[in-house]
Amino acid sequence: MLTNLGKQSLSYTNYSTRNLPFLVSYFVDLARYRHLAWSLVGSDLRARFRRSYLGILWAVLQPLGFSLIVALVWSQVFKTQSIETFIIYVFSGMLIWEYFSQSVIVSLDSLINSAGYLKQARIPFLVFQMRVPLSALVVLMFGMIGLFGMMAAVGHLPPLGFHLLLLPVYFLMLVTFMIPMSVIASIVGPSFRDSKHVIGLLLQAVFFVSPVMLERGVLNNEAIAFIKYLNPLVPLLDLFRDPMLYGKLWQAHDVLVWLGWTAGLWIVAVLAAARAGRSIIFAL
Amino acid sequence: MSSPRRAVDLKVFSSEIQNRLKGAERRDGTGEDRRPCAIEIENVTLRYPIGPFVRGSLKSGLLRVFGHKEQGAAIQFVDGLKDLNLNIALGERVGIVGRNGSGKSTLLRMLAGIYPVKAGTVRVLGQIGTLLDIGLGFETESTGRENIYYRGIAMGHSPARLKEVEQEIIDFADIGQFIDLPMRTYSAGMQVRLGFAISTQLSPDILLIDEIFGAGDALFQKRALARIMDVVRHAGIMMLATHDLALVDELCTRVIWLDSGRVVRDGPTETVMPHFKAFMRGEQVL
């Protein structure tokens, strides 16, 4: 597959620019177009929030509203936890879930929405593929402010300690996981236009087997314990909550599952990008 | 404009092109330094896939299950360009003519490196600037001023360089206070004017233009034409795909007549155009 792409890029050469092997040029191009990537992230945020009265506040209000609703209902039904800790639990889960699901859904259309640029100049696709997880990350950061505010309001500030240093590492790991996922989605989206509906359904299924509002202890039940090792959302949520909510260090199995998924996604993403090459342009 | 460019080994190009580029970097008649630029297309075939995008629909799949036979063999692809060979070198202003769907736009997009080729080789020397679909590729929630940067950077210019020419672009587009309003508030004509101003502000080595004179009011069209002439003077190579035959007569030194992705005739404007005009009047067959 890589040789196929090699052939494709060799058939068009502009000798006034440097010509590097495919994988190297992929990242060198990204460095060249970093201004565009960042400007587009800014443009995305404006497009999402500019015309609304509360603007970026919605990045906080939406997961907040959802957690309030869920917490109120569930605390009535189950009466197991104190409502404050449950709200924080659901809020923290929703932030990560929204990041993941929004990135996947928007990525399906990321190249289609960028057709205007891609049909005007030879711009690396990766700029537009990275745009989605990066924009979502900025929204997530605003959500983090909301989470801190919420925790302060109910008197459960994150326990201080060295484990908090894991948080920046976590966000790096989250983006490292999400970028190849977005690349894959951006290639699948235009190639199979049905995928939007299928993936919408899939996401709903994943939501119900992820500890977003589900108590994470439930997954220790032997009958469904395998989900812990298959569902990438389990480590993404655990690795976030351990330092943030419980003042704990990470557990090995979470890190391993994250590593397995991330490595797998990168391999698939590179192969898919190499195979598709620039010919996705015909499907936009 | 004369940013440093790395030394290029011209040996990859054919001897014809090499000969024509010899001494190109010396001062030419206009008193300007010209960097060598060239385009060489060898046996190029460009194929649009159609198959998976039509056949793959769920509906046709279901119908097949119930024994429905699709009429005729499904078309899998269309050849946009077929076995094309072209040499274009510094100083040429090429008009591309042909009926609708003859491959004019496809050829330009292929040269810009936007469409991948199925077979053959494309060798290009020189920084490429495009004027294709001027209305496309704007962030509608961002202001015109912001879009100058998005588009300029997408074309390969640095933010610093764009800052220098920002005011000139705004002046030429002549859209007044709208420049600081979101682009969704613009009329179609204003969008085209801004797009045109951005695309033509910084002259490229190779300029590819696709039928851009249809938009804007009469006054703007006149200024646009003057500006195009100016950019063309600075560009090393200009290629223009158009149905405006008078424009071809006026601007171009060479004409390539395409039909169904193949070259029908290729030569000096005064030799090719009479044949093409006769063909368009129905007085001559291919």
Image: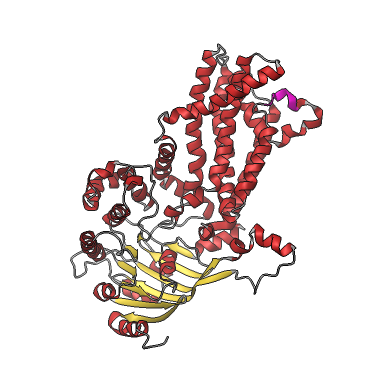
Q: Is residue B150 above or below residue A215?
A: below
Q: Please provide percent x and percent y for residue B241.
A: 35, 70
Q: Is residue A257 above or below residue A67?
A: below
A231 or A160, nearer to the observer: A231
Residue A250 appears in the picture as rendered: yes
Q: Is residue A169 above or below residue B189?
A: above
- Picture mark count: 0
Magenta segment includes A78: no
- Residue at 40% over, 52% down: B137
Magenta residues span: A214-219
Q: Quadrant of residue A47?
A: top left
Task: Tell whether A110 sits left or right of B223.
Answer: right
- Residue at 57% over, 24% down: A166
A10 or A86, nearer to the observer: A86
Residue farthest to the right? A223
Magenta segment includes A218: yes
A245 or B92, nearer to the observer: A245
Q: Quadrant of residue B195?
A: bottom left
Q: Main secondary structure of the magenta part?
A: helix
Q: Please provide percent x and percent y for residue B263.
A: 42, 79
Q: Please provide percent x and percent y for residue B35.
A: 29, 63
